[in-house]
Amino acid sequence: KIRSHFSSSDYSAQSDSGCVGCFANIVNAMFSLCKNSTAETAEEVVTPAPTGTMPTSAADMPRQTSDYTHGVRTAQDERISPERALAKLQEGNVRFVSGAGTRANFDAEHRQALAAHGQNPMAAIIGCADSRAPIEILFDALPGDIFTLRNAGNTLSHAEGSMVGSVEYCVGPLGAKLIVVLGHTKCGAVMGATQTMLASKKAGGAAAEKQTTLDKLLAGLAPVVQQAQAELKGTESAEEIAAHAIEVNVFAGIEKLLIYSEPIRAKVKSGEVQVHGAVYDIVSGKVNFLGQHPRLSLILGIQAGLSKEE
């Protein structure tokens, strides 16, 4: 197009005047081209793309249909039952394992909706801080779906106020009906507690003179490890004990949560809230849902009796 703006005399001038004349002519031609083509360019921008063409930006991508008022869970949506919340977590994990996740559909409009209308999580999940077990991702959940709490070993062995109090907030003011205690395979905290317990037994039960906070956390998991070893009939293999202790620790977490929190216990007893256990396999990506505590009625009954005595 630039070349078409040159006349024959221009080309002659380039031969006679050298590079300086050539450069000046090119600049003049470019200016003339940009000036004359402004209307054409504007017209091209607003011309609609033909039907059936591939999307060229995120705005052109079809948005996933949603049951939510604003395309994401906010406080304007209805609260859902614990059964439905559990089913949605299971469905999300299936999508994650199959590689059919929908998390990429979250955009600026969804962020604005959550900021403007508030949160309404469908579940509270207590999980491990292990970087290989990202809770929202493995359930293919969007911001606003899950109230997430994590620490090393997904433990409640010391009545951690921040954990218990946060769950109370989730099932109280926020209105979630489902709590999940989620462990995972190859948990470093559980393995550390197992090795600590076995080493202590060999040393005759002697404890270190100075304990770090981590030492105290691992020591708090010792009853879980001891129960796992007893159920395996006294095996001394750290790997086998730790693998079984992961599931034992999940149910221990449920029990501790119900013991430490009267508000949660009352909601579970009434049937308003359910507490389930689960274990995430970091290799397969699948979550094995374990159900509610097998001794749930006994735990609720004992705590009710203690409350009356107090």
Image (tube, rainbow, N blue to C red):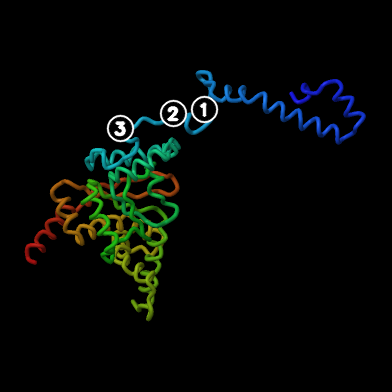
Q: Residue at x 37, y 45 (%)?
A: 143
Mark 2 falls on what kind of element?
Answer: loop
**How many C-alpha atoms fall within 10 Å of the one at disc 1: few (<14), some, or many (≥20)?**
few
Residue that badge 3 annotates? 67
Q: How many marks?
A: 3
Q: Is residue 152 left or right of residue 32?
A: left
Q: Residue at x 37, y 74 (%)?
A: 200
Residue that badge 1 annotates? 55
Q: Is residue 55 above or below residue 82?
A: above
Mark 1 falls on what kind of element?
Answer: loop
Which amino acid, mark 1? Pro
Q: Looking at the image, tell me whether mark 3 or mark 1 is earlier in sequence order.
A: 1
Q: Looking at the image, tell me whether mark 2 or mark 1 is earlier in sequence order.
A: 1
Q: Position of residue 188 (x, y in %)?
A: 42, 60
Q: Is residue 70 above or below residue 250?
A: above
CA distance separating discs 3 and 2? 16 Å
Residue that badge 2 annotates? 62
Q: Position of residue 121 (x, y in %)?
A: 29, 45
Near-viewer residue (278 or 149): 149
Which amino acid, mark 3? Asp
Q: Position of residue 78 (x, y in %)?
A: 23, 38
Q: Could you tell me which quadrant the C terminus lies in?
A: bottom left
Q: Residue at x 56, y 25 (%)?
A: 45
